[in-house]
Image: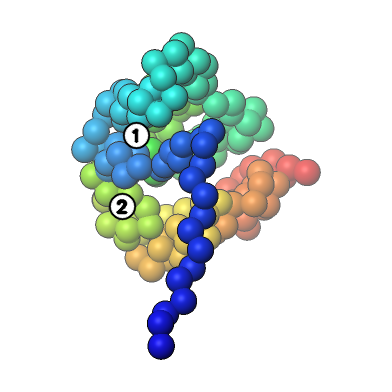
Amino acid sequence: MPRSRKPRRPARRHSRPLRLRPPSYRLARVGLLTDQEWADGVADRLAAAFGSQVRQHLAPWREDRGTPSPDMVTLLAEIRAHVPVGVLSNSTDALHKDLSHHGIVFDSEFPSADLGVDKPSPLAFRIAAQHMGHAPDTMAYFDDEPTFVTAARSIGLDAHLFTGSADFTRTLIRSGLPLAARA
């Protein structure tokens, strides 16, 4: 009995598929590529797919360093008056420059590119805690990604899901920090 064949889909005429999440970003996140090398690779792939004229439109993408939450920046300063605060981010080596650009100051900065490992690996959390000079079970950790919260808990961090500044502040007040409550 002959097998039935699935009908072939007609070829697309006017669009070319483009994979926007190539493995190179992961390489930049763990420090095997710099942020600039990664961005250059993205620009090269876009130019190859859509023509060299696309490069002139990439400047706004590279210039965009995000917009910090003023409430969180103020809260960070309040917390740092009582305890050291670090940031562990799945990011390229651009994190230091981005934080400086916005005037955001942490006691310790840990872009995954500097660590050579990214979240949710328990090793990322262990390395950050070790560099801060504290045992994981003496530290609090907040993240908006549930998988990362679970991973942080696996090494003993007092990990919480970040849902906003008001809930974040309430949790810190319950832990004993003398902070002003937020609405």
Q: Residue at x 58, y 48 (%)?
A: 177
The three-letter code of the residue at mark 2 reads Ala
Q: Residue at x 41, y 19 (%)?
A: 51
Number of numbered callouts drawn? 2
Residue 106 occupies quadrant: top left
**Circle 2 Cα neighbour tier, 10 Å, few/some/many (<14 / 14–19 / ≥20):** many
Q: Position of residue 138 (x, y in %)?
A: 40, 58
Instruction: Say which of 85 and 146 sits in front.
Output: 146
Q: Give the distance between the C-alpha atoms of the residues marked 1 and 2, in whole angstroms.
A: 14 Å
Q: Residue at x 35, y 29 (%)?
A: 45
User: SS at mark 1?
Assistant: loop
> Which residue carries the number 2 mark?
124
Q: Position of residue 156 (x, y in %)?
A: 38, 66
Q: Is residue 140 left or right of residue 144?
A: left
Instruction: Say which of 31 and 167 sits in front.
Output: 31
> Which residue carries the number 1 mark?
92
Outermost bottom residue: 1
User: SS at mark 2?
Assistant: helix
